[in-house]
């Protein structure tokens, strides 16, 4: 049976069914019905947050101070031991819901997202832009291998540019590994591959050593995407637990936040902070204030559609309350 037809039949049947029949419906049918409702044109959306979300610039590209994180859109969640959250996110963030999320983000002043090259998600982004007139900008990293010659990497970057990607960065998972392997020069080569296309080019990292190597080697990145959050939360690491930096258990992604803040003061390029809420362990207001007070120019925020308006409101209030002069000047 055609899936779309089955969804419509389910919704229609649910309206007419008795309470007992509805309760008897299995969980997969309920999920399908919810997706059909999400596709309804008149479905209510959260109201836009009051006040404009401030913006900065990366190589002339105007970027909202809060960017939409892509992990929830690609169904990859850092949920510690709660593995069911992966499936829950996948069932909630259907293609229709992702399209709605992008629209709500734009409505609230979020004009840029960061995401990986996940084909299914990129297809939805294309639909949002080409079929619905969406203006969301894309900052994307490719997961193509970075190895001598960079043949696959070049091909992937070319496709990203052809698809309309606005800015490209070198994936932090790869840069972390290359620095540990003593192959940091390959990061510089990857940066140059991207820069040849004339798009803003970044370097991502979980490990601060990547940023240090990039600055020392003058790799030429236009911006950095670096993890940044404090450890003052219940499951945050204790000093003697920081033996394996960025380990998912006990749940941290910035092993030395103060060292990161101190080093980034010396960096004169825009800095996008990510993992700022430590995968939901730090409340938005606390997280945004920490990263902006300590030097980040922009902050990624993984948000479901129903969280966007409130998070943008919080971020706008935090940004408005900052002193005119920060310890690290605005770089973007």
Image (spheres, grey):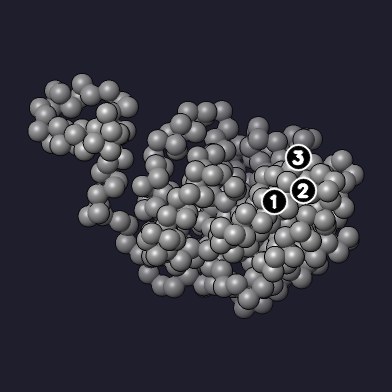
Extreme-bottom residue of the structure: 324
Work out whether 238 lies above or below 214.
above
Quarter in which the C terminus is drawn: bottom right
The quadrant holding residue 224 is bottom right
Q: Are marks 2 and 1 in contact (CB under 8 Å)?
A: yes
Q: Are marks 3 and 2 in contact (CB under 8 Å)?
A: no
In this rendering, position of residue 222 left or right of residue 9:
right
Return the mark for residue 155: 1
In this rendering, position of residue 137 left or right of residue 200:
left
Mark 3 or mark 1: whose residue is earlier in sequence: 1
Work out whether 80 lies above or below 38.
above
Question: CA separation, marks 2 and 1?
Answer: 6 Å
Return the mark for residue 245: 3
Q: Secondary structure at mark 3?
A: loop
* Front-lying residue, 220 or 250: 220
| Residue occupying the point 56% across, 28% down | 81
């Amino acid at each position: 049976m055609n899936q779309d037809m089955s969804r419509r039949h389910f919704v229609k049947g649910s309206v007419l069914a008795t309470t007992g029949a509805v309760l008897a419906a299995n969980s997969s049918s309920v999920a399908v019905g919810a997706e059909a409702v999400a596709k309804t044109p008149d479905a209510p959306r959260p109201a836009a947050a009051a006040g404009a979300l401030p913006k900065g610039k990366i190589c002339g590209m105007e970027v909202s101070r809060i960017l939409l994180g892509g992990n929830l859109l690609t169904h990859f969640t850092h949920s510690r031991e709660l593995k069911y959250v992966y499936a829950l996110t996948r069932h909630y963030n259907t293609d229709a819901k992702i399209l709605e999320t992008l629209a709500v983000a734009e409505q609230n002043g979020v004009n840029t997202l960061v995401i990986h090259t996940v084909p299914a998600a990129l297809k939805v982004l294309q639909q949002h832009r080409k079929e619905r007139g969406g203006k969301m900008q894309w900052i994307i990293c490719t997961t193509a291998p970075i190895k001598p010659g960079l043949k696959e990497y070049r091909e992937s970057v070319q496709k990203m540019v052809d698809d309309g990607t606005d800015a490209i960065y070198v994936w932090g998972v790869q840069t972390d590994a290359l620095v540990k392997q003593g192959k940091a020069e390959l990061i510089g080569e990857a940066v140059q591959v991207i820069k040849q296309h004339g798009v803003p080019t970044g370097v991502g990292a979980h490990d601060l050593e990547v940023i240090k190597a990039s600055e020392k080697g003058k790799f030429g990145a236009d911006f950095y995407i670096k993890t940044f959050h404090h450890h003052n939360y219940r499951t945050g690491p204790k000093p003697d637990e920081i033996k394996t930096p960025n380990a998912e258990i006990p749940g941290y992604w910035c092993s030395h936040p103060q060292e990161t803040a101190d080093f980034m003061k010396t960096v004169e390029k825009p800095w996008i902070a990510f993992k700022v809420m430590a995968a939901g362990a730090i409340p938005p207001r606390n997280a945004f204030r920490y990263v902006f007070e300590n030097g980040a120019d922009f902050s990624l925020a993984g948000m479901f559609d129903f969280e966007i308006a409130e998070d943008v409101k919080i971020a706008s209030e935090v940004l408005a309350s900052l002193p005119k002069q920060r310890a690290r000047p605005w770089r973007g």
